[in-house]
Amino acid sequence: MFDSLRTLIVERHRRRPDAERERIKHRLLEFQIGRFGWLIDLPSEVFFGADLKVLATIYGTDKWNRHWYAQHYEDLFCKIRRKRINLLEIGIGGDENPRKGGNSLRMWRAYFPKGRIFGIDICDKSAHDRGRIKTFCGSQADPEFLDSVVREIGEVDVIIDDGSHINSHMIFTFQHLFPHLAAGGYYIVEDTQTSYWPGSFGGNETDRNDPATAMGYFKSLTDGLNWREFKNSYTPNYFDLNIESIAFYHNLIAIKKRLSEGPRRPRDQAAPCA
Ligand SMILES: C[S@@+](CC[C@H](N)C(=O)[O-])C[C@H]1O[C@@H](n2cnc3c(N)ncnc32)[C@H](O)[C@@H]1O
């Protein structure tokens, strides 16, 4: 029954004309951040909690139906869904309008029933603070601001960069925040297509290994996974020692942090997803 209901919601949402969809989204948003938001949150969490594709559709984030990231997030996060995690997303959405955006924060809150969900945006998004969601206003390119955020949150289990998508910001924010990620945590960079877009994003299509672009930079980290096998003397850096894996998807990169800096060992038997 829930499968057919879910299909119905997704299909109806998809077929509406853009203007109508925007109007519905706006009404839904006003309702969700209002006093009776729990009327949507509670059934969403109870009935669709494990299905990120449906949650992304209900909450109107472009992580599904435009970018197709929700399927990858399900693979990555299904084992930690029921844990008490801290998730920090950079980029809350809705640009300058303080009441717009927050869609992905609410989606994560429904997906991680015990998770604390934090958001960073250059615009004030405090209208979305409610229950397990807390927002911070500042730039992902400001080291003091980032330090103050992690001081307040403590260790972060999942960091998602869906902010400015400027290549220098994506690289800087990773270098600054990865050390604050919990052992075994995930750092995700969305919309890496800007690596190929010159101009304000700072991409470079001519040299696709340009280390000043997100794709070029993260590709350059992959050799560090094997640094113990280098024949010449080499001093490993923090990233060589602490990255477990780097997965590249369409416009999305997922970096998993190691549990310890020591030699690599066989993994524990993989736990099945709930
Ligand atoms: C694509 S939207 C985020 C969408 C949201 N994560 C979702 O999935 O629903 C990008 C957001 O990043 C914010 N942003 C832009 N530059 C930023 C910066 N330097 N630091 C922090 N946030 C920034 C914008 O204000 C905008 O709200």
Image (cartoon, rainbow, N blue to C red):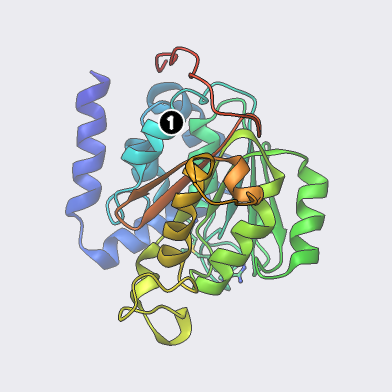
- Mark 1 within 8 Å of ligand 1, using the beta carbon: no
Residue 31 rendering spot, x and y as whole percentages? 51, 48
Residue 21 left/right relative to 165: left
Residue occupying image coordinates x 59% and y 51%: 233
Q: Which residue lies at the image location 50% right of the left edge and 72% below the top edge?
A: 167
What is the number of callouts on the image?
1
| Depth check, front residue: 93 or 222 | 222
Residue 62, quarter of the rendered image: bottom left
What residue appears at the point 36 percent right and 56 percent down from the top-left corner?
24
On the question of residue 84 being in view, the answer is yes
Drawn side of residue 258 relative to residue 137, left or right: left
Give the quarter the ligand 1 occupies.
Answer: bottom right
What residue sits 42% from the left and 74% below the top? 210
Residue 129 seen from this side: no
Is 138 positioned to the left or the right of 269 in the image? right
Q: Which residue is farthest bottom?
A: 199
Q: Which residue is mark 1?
A: 44
Please tell me whether mark 1 sits on a helix, a strand or a loop.
helix
Q: Quadrant of residue 257?
A: top right
Q: Please provide percent x and percent y for residue 152.
A: 82, 46
Counting from the top left corner in percent of width and height, residue 239 is at 60, 49
Question: Which quadrant of the figure contains the N terminus?
Answer: top left
What is the quadrant of the C terminus in the image? top left
Above or below, 236 relative to 96: above
Closest to the observer, 249 or 60: 249
Label 1 Cα crowd, 10 Å radius (few <14 / some 14-19 / many 20+): many
In this image, 145 relative to 238: left or right? Answer: right
Residue type, mark 1 in image: Ser
Q: Is residue 1 above or below residue 153?
A: above
Q: x, y percentage for residue 47?
A: 39, 23
